[in-house]
Image (cartoon, helix red, strand yellow):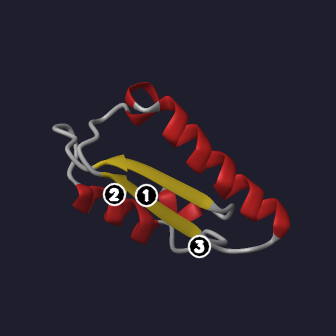
């Protein structure tokens, strides 16, 4: 399913998630081989719900990613 993604993709991942390892984050990125671009951010010490655990940090990272997409620049 992820190979159908064509849009730019941002993967946010908690480095200490007990649900899924950071290897899984890399597998997500690798599976999105047709995405226009991909970026992965691992939050050391973060768990599975980064948007709840660290809302300001994740919101800033998402905004920066979207701003780069609008500007046409890569990370």
User: Could you tell me which residue is drawn at 61 percent across and 68 percent down?
Assistant: 35
User: Mark 3–mark 1 contact, CB under 8 Å?
Assistant: no
User: Could you tell me which residue is drawn at 80 percent across and 71 percent down?
Assistant: 72
Which of marks 1 and 3 precedes in the sequence? 3
Residue 5 figure quarter: bottom right
- State how far apart marks 3 and 1 are (Cα): 19 Å
Q: How many marks?
A: 3
Q: Nearer the viewer, residue 34 or 25?
A: 25
Which of marks 1 and 2 precedes in the sequence? 2
Q: Residues within 10 Å of mark 1 (few under 14, many from 20)?
A: some
Farthest residue, direction top? 52
Which of marks 3 and 2 precedes in the sequence? 2
Residue 27: give x, y in percent of width and height.
33, 64
Residue 14: give x, y in percent of width and height.
31, 45
Residue 38 figure quarter: bottom right
Residue topped by disc 2: 25
Residue topped by disc 3: 34
In the figure, 56 relative to 8: above or below?
Answer: above
Label 2: which secondary element? helix
Label 1: which secondary element? strand
Image quadrant containing the C terminus: bottom right
Q: Nearer the viewer, residue 70 or 54?
A: 54
Residue topped by disc 1: 41
- State how far apart marks 2 and 1 are (Cα): 9 Å
Farthest residue, direction left? 18
Label 3: which secondary element? loop
- State how far apart marks 2 and 3 are (Cα): 16 Å
Residue 73: give x, y in percent of width and height.
74, 74
């Amino acid at each position: 399913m992820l190979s159908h993604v064509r849009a730019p993709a941002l993967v946010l991942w908690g480095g200490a998630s007990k649900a899924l390892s950071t290897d899984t984050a890399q597998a997500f990125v690798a599976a999105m081989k047709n995405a226009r671009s991909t970026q992965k951010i691992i939050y050391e010490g973060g768990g599975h719900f980064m948007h709840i655990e660290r809302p300001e940090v994740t919101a800033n990272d998402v905004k920066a990613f979207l701003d780069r997409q609008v500007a046409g620049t890569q990370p």
